[in-house]
Image (cartoon, grey):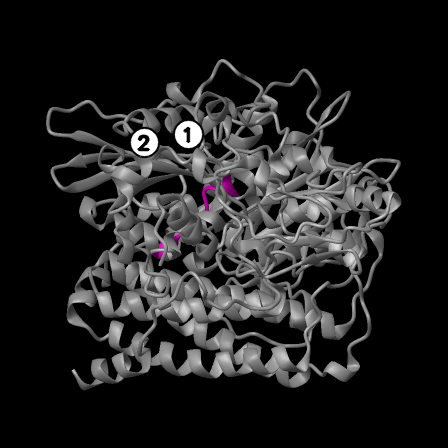
Amino acid sequence: MLKELKILKHHGKQYISDLRRQKISPLFRGRPVISGNISEEERRSAASVCPVRAIDKSSGSIDLGRCVFCKECAFLLPEKIEFTNDYHIASNDRNSLIIKPGDNNLIKLDEKKVRPEVRDLFKGALKLRQVSAGGDNSCEMELAASGNVNFDLGRYGIEFVASPRHADGIVITGPISENMSRALEITYDAIPEPKIIILAGADSISGGIFEGSPALDRSFLGMHHIDLYVPGNPAHPLTFINGILDMLGIKK
Amino acid sequence: MKSHPGYLIINNNSPSSGIEDIPVLDYLSFREKIISALNEENKHCVSYYCVPSVDSLRLVCCIADDSDNSIEIFSCQPGRDTKVIESAALLSPQVHIFEREIHENAGIVFESHPWLKPVRFSYNRADTSKTMDGYPFYSIHSEELHEVGVGPVHAGVIEPGHFRFICNGEKVHHLEIQLGYQHRGVEELFLSKQDALQRCILSESIAGETSVGHSLAHSQLIESLSGMEVSEELQIERCIALELERVAVHIGDTAALCGDVAYQLGQVVCEALRTIVINTTQLWCGNRFGKGLIRPGGSNYPLNNEIAEAISDMADIIAERFGEIADCIYSTPSVLARFDEIGIVTKKQAHSIGTVGPSARTCGIVRDIRRSHPFQYFRNYSVEPVILESGDVLARGMLRSLEVQESLKIIRDLLKIWTEGKRKEEKPVYNYRLKPDSFSLALLEGWRGEICHSVMTDKDGKISHYKVKDPSFHNWMALALAVRNQEISDFPVCNKSFNLSYCGHDL
């Protein structure tokens, strides 16, 4: 008993009290800022170094839905591209994940695009079913970590559940392998209406490094409305949590 | 590099060999060689695969010796029309999974193979009429037995796979594990992605919780094939990163084991400790899983004194706090009752299926690549592997606690040797040229066990064949054996005690 008490004393208070403003390591690779005066040649060279075609060679913009946050473009052009440690990078609007040269605005949800029933029904409690479809297990571990003693997503009534029948939505990780595509569809179908779809990580949003692999079948995404995109490689728990809170309209 | 009439002997990460140096045997002698080598207890098969080419197929087998730093490589070329050959799996069960893979990819039929089934239903399999839904499960017809199917989508936030149990009441007679759901075509992408950085990112994504392990194996391979050498300081940094990964996952696994037996104190304390470890990795390189940290020829995130100090402080905190919770976990009767003598894999079984990593070391097998085939700075720093004998969930749990302390000691020792002043500027190298017509193989000890990447290049130095072997490829069979004659309710703890990779297996 004394041993346990000593451990509890060492354990102390672990939860992050303010998930909205938690400080993170300066080197964390979050929202990039591209200088407004990036030259045409620099845009081309940044685009050519990008392993996942996230950089558009004519406009010089970076698509966070594709970006695997390797930061090689910033290592190449340290004066022109910088990855800030801003982890507030989830959005329901695919286009707002595209960062243009000169942009230094925070990434925001498009409030008008949030379906009214999502906030009406799920603001008080949201149960999610996770499906890994070719995910490399880093995104899955970060999603699981969102509910751990540190991040404690459960404080908002948001948690992962075992059965799709108990769920209000699905969180997909991985580039969606062909071998998993049917199980994904079946799981989604088993969730009662209304339901939401969240894509977590570059692999699920765009295919990431696996884009174009003949072993994938991403047709599921074309058939359904996506409610939230959570970029990252993997998506950080803070990115995921803040994205969901924004979607549900939870301010604090 | 030594050549024998029947096989080529190389060392781990030795400079690459010419493909023509690998002896080509006829299939009869090739099979004989596999069986006789694997009869020796200290040898196991690290990789065995088929290299397709325009006019023929070539089977290449790589066997490592646990007691000295050598790997035997030999091959054979069954004719294009030879579709049926005699299996070696009945006499050397550990090649069963490799033969299945060769069968699936190249269509070769291994006669008398006890279990010649598809491995992962790869998109480019030889026989596309075989589909996931038609997987030929083993079944027993009896009124007393019933089957339980679990997955591919499981209750937790984990990867997909299907488990099919044959039970008598609560007791498991047999478990068959069907994988392949995570197949992304990784090995083919190593060929189609011509860009060096793309291949780095790909190697980090083979199994995300082993990003450092797999990206380091890839970098070792590239360095040996392009003749690059990296400084001793960088080698130390890589070893520290690898041990940080081991510590983080082992602590996370301990949390999961506690969670499964409702020992909440152990679970939450270990979760919090894991966070401290991976946040230290994030402090170093901006990513909690070490993605971006390992690159061929250099590093974008050189260690500096400030980070070294943070790692050292972390090591002290974790050693103390994980030590006290581990003491508590493994002295709590309700925990021990669920772990002790549950899910036993015997030493004999472990040998015969060629299991690696902690799964082998908990069965009394001294098998640790850091010691037998040292790589990076482990060539100068000797690691004493932790060996336990009982082969049960308890051993696999306790091994993790002991290895966490061992790894923390390694990290502290290495930090003492490492000096920032000696560090030279080493940027990652992406414009390397690989030696043409060559073969190379890289082994390392990841947290799950032995990772093996091997590669062949064509006459222009382009990668013509890339083979990845995650330790899970051997070890899934150990899980299937462990649950035999156990209560089905013990499956979750057995499964967690191995924590095998689905995507690393499915590739």
Mark identifier at residue B114: 1
Say yes or no: labels 1 and 2 on the same chain. no
The part of the chain drawn in magenta is B497-505
Residues B348 and B201: in front is: B201
Mark identifier at residue A195: 2
Q: x, y percentage for residue B106?
A: 61, 24
Q: Residue B445 vs residue B362: left or right?
A: right
* Above or below A170: residue B243: below
User: What residue is shown at x 27% (from left), y 69% (from top)?
Assistant: B266
| Camera sees residue B81 | yes
Mark identifier at residue B93: none
User: What residue is shown at x 41% (from left), y 29% (from top)?
Assistant: B114
User: What residue is shown at x 82% (from left), y 39% (from top)?
Assistant: B20
User: What residue is shown at x 26% (from left), y 59% (from top)?
Assistant: B259
Q: x, y percentage for residue B343?
A: 27, 53
Residues B431 and A130: in front is: A130
| Camera sees residue B346 | no
Residues B354 and B216: in front is: B216
* Above or below B65: residue A217: above
Q: Residue B282 vs residue B147: left or right?
A: right
**SS of the residue under disc 1:** loop
- Confirm whether the magenta stretch covers residue B54: no
Amino acid type, residue under disc 1 in the picture: Pro
Amino acid type, residue under disc 2 in the picture: Lys
Q: Chain of mark 2?
A: A
